[in-house]
Structures are given as structure tokens and as C-alpha cells.
Amino acid sequence: MEIEIIKCHGSGNDFLLIDEISNHYSFTEKQRRDLTIALCNRESELGADGILFVMNSDKADGRMRVFNSDGSEASMCGNGLRCVARYVCELKGTSEAVIETMKADLAVRKDEEIFPEIPTYLVEISPVSFNVKDLPLQIDKETLLNEEIPSLSKKLAFTAVAVPNPHLITIVENEVIRSDVQKEISQFVNGPNELFPDGVNVSFVKALNPGKIYVRTFERGVGFTNACGTAMSASTLVSCLNGLNEIEKPVEVFNNGGKVRCVAHKQNNTYKIDLIGNATYVYQTKVQVDIDSPENFTCLGKEPFVQETEQYAKLQEEVKGYLNEALNA
Ligand SMILES: N[C@@H](CCC[C@H](N)C(=O)O)C(=O)O
């Protein structure tokens, strides 16, 4: 079969977007998994952190299913949702929409550009839960807020939060960011282990200035990515709860692929976060693939989105310069 694909990214966290609204594809669950592993392979002609399947919804303007590059399905993806937000809004000719995801229907809208001529979308990140059962994290307490997990580290204090995909967050200094500690902990909690039976996204956060943080994430099902939208949202909230930033005030979140803006909100003891950032198209292509044996697919040419890719590179240059100074201080 032939499948149309848009390669897109949010903060350099890159995805292959497959439109099942306009195209009548029909995939079994196994086919979705195997297709994801084959097309996301970085050694292949495509390669990506995951696939975004955009589908019709009975109750919203569209539905997103997201698969990590290892073929596992995730309940949410913030950077991916911005790309899906743009795709659905442009398809329907609107500037706002509601997208059904695995655990929630989320409001999205086109927003003021975070950098000149960069398509920018705001997506809602919710529900937020600090109950360890929602990750799941198997420990003998209800929440883990800035506390040690001695079997992981005797020095770092972690917060566990589901948004609703699972995150483990710690606030650190530059020398820890530069060390191998994050890799070692992340590989442990994403291998067979008793703490996180389903794995977890692990973020190390460095407070830069008031209103600015840097977040590096090792993603479950992928490894280190340029950025993780749900992780940046969860990290913003954790930074507010630690007094480094303020609820309701925008926080600039720097990452290895660019930057986003997040705003944490609190209403009736419930949190939600706005994630605002680019939704950039890189190229469109078509692949010819045997859907039951997708490893040997053929890519039928690529049409690049030159202007927006070049514009995003300018944002990245600016961020790189800023981070060089901030993280080496
Ligand atoms: N990159 C995403 C998160 C993708 C899913 C994650 N790896 C998981 O398994 O929970 C984002 O931008 O949020």
C-alpha cells in the first residue's frame, strides 16, 4: 500500500504524521506497531521519535494516537499534539479545536508566534495527577514530591507526576546535567524494574533565571530526545511548586531542540498547563510499504517545507547561543 506522510516537529521532537481522516487507511494494532518501528528507524530513509496517527473522533474535531519509536503506544504527547493541532485546524479551516487523546479531550488553538513566522499552537496538558498509582510508581506512599528514591540516587530529590503520561522530575545543577547520571537512572527505570513497571519519562531540570528553565528528557520508548512537551509542561509545574516560578505566569522552557512557553494553572486544587510552541512541517512524502512486513519500505520522493524549516533554524541558533552561556556558567 501507499501511505502519505508529513514529517513534522515540535522543538525538534520529530514525528511522522499519518492522516486517517482524509485517507481511508485501515491498520490493525500489530500493523500500527510494526509500521512505527520500521518508519521511525533512524537508519532508514525516514526516522523519527514516533508516529502521530490523526483520526476521526465521535466527540471531538479529531483524534490523536501516538506511538513511540519502539512501537509502544503513549497516552499523550505534547509536542506531537501541537503538530496535530495545526494539521486538524488547517484541515477544518479553523483556528481552534478539541482533540481526543487516550485519556482526555484537549483544547488546542493557534497562538501568537513564539518567533517570527513560526506556526505556533497552544495545547492543553491535562489531567495532572501526583498520585503514584497514576504513573504507576510502586512505592509505599501516595505521592512522591521532592523526595529521594534511594535505589535510584542518594543525592537527587524526585517528583513523580502523570500529565497523564508518566514523568519523573528532578531539579539539578549544571554539573549533574553534564554527567551520565540521567542516562543511568533512565535506563534503569525503563528496563525491567519494580518501581516503574510501565517505564517513565525522566527529566533533569535546571533553573536558569526567574521565568526560565532548561529541561532535558530521556523519553520512555525512545531515549534522549531534543525535547518532550509533556515533560516541559510537568517540569514547569514542578518548578512553580518549588518556588522557582509562579503559577499563572509564563515560563520560557529551553531544550536541546529549541524553546517553548508554558503556563501552569490551578483551579479548585486541580492543575493544568498550557504548552505553547512551534508546529513545524519538514517535508511531505509517500511511502510504498508491505503493511504486514514494513521493514523494506520505499520512500517515493520528499517535498520539503523550505521556508518554515529555515525559519526554525534561526530560532535554534538563538537558543543555542543562550544555552551555551547559561549551561556552562
Ligand atoms: N514526546 C512526547 C511524549 C511521547 C510519549 C512518551 N515517550 C511516553 O511514552 O509517555 C511529548 O512531547 O510529550
Image (cartoon, grey):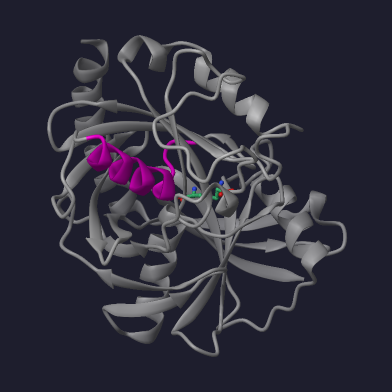
On-image quarter of the C terminus: top left
Is residue 282 shown to the viewer in this render? no
Q: Nearer the viewer, residue 144 or 260?
A: 144
Q: Residue at x 73, y 63 (%)?
A: 32
- The part of the chain drawn in magenta is 225-242
Q: Residue at x 78, y 55 (%)?
A: 34
Q: Residue at x 54, y 25 (%)?
A: 149
* In this picture, residue 289 sits left or right of residue 173: right
Asked if the magenta segment contains residue 263, the reply would be no
Q: Main secondary structure of the magenta part?
A: helix
* In this picture, residue 193 sits left or right of residue 207: right
Q: Nearer the viewer, residue 66 or 143?
A: 143
User: Which residue occupies the extreme bottom position in the image?
Assistant: 58
Is residue 199 shown to the viewer in this render? yes
Please tell me how many numbered marks the rendered image carries: 0
Figure check: 58 above or below 40: below
Where does the image place residue 80, in percent across and percent down from the top left? 46, 57
On-image quarter of the N terminus: bottom right
Where does the image place residue 253, in percent across and percent down from the top left? 26, 39
Figure check: 102 above or below 172: below
Where does the image place residue 195, in percent across and percent down from the top left? 66, 35
Figure check: 26 above or below 15: below
* In this picture, residue 328 sits left or right of residue 128: left
Q: Nearer the viewer, residue 68 or 120?
A: 68
Q: Residue at x 14, y 52 (%)?
A: 116
Q: Quadrant of residue 112?
A: bottom left
* In this picture, residue 55 sits left or right of residue 9: right
Figure check: 264 above or below 42: below
Asked if the magenta segment contains residue 230, the reply would be yes
Where does the image place residue 259, in percent across and percent down from the top left? 27, 41
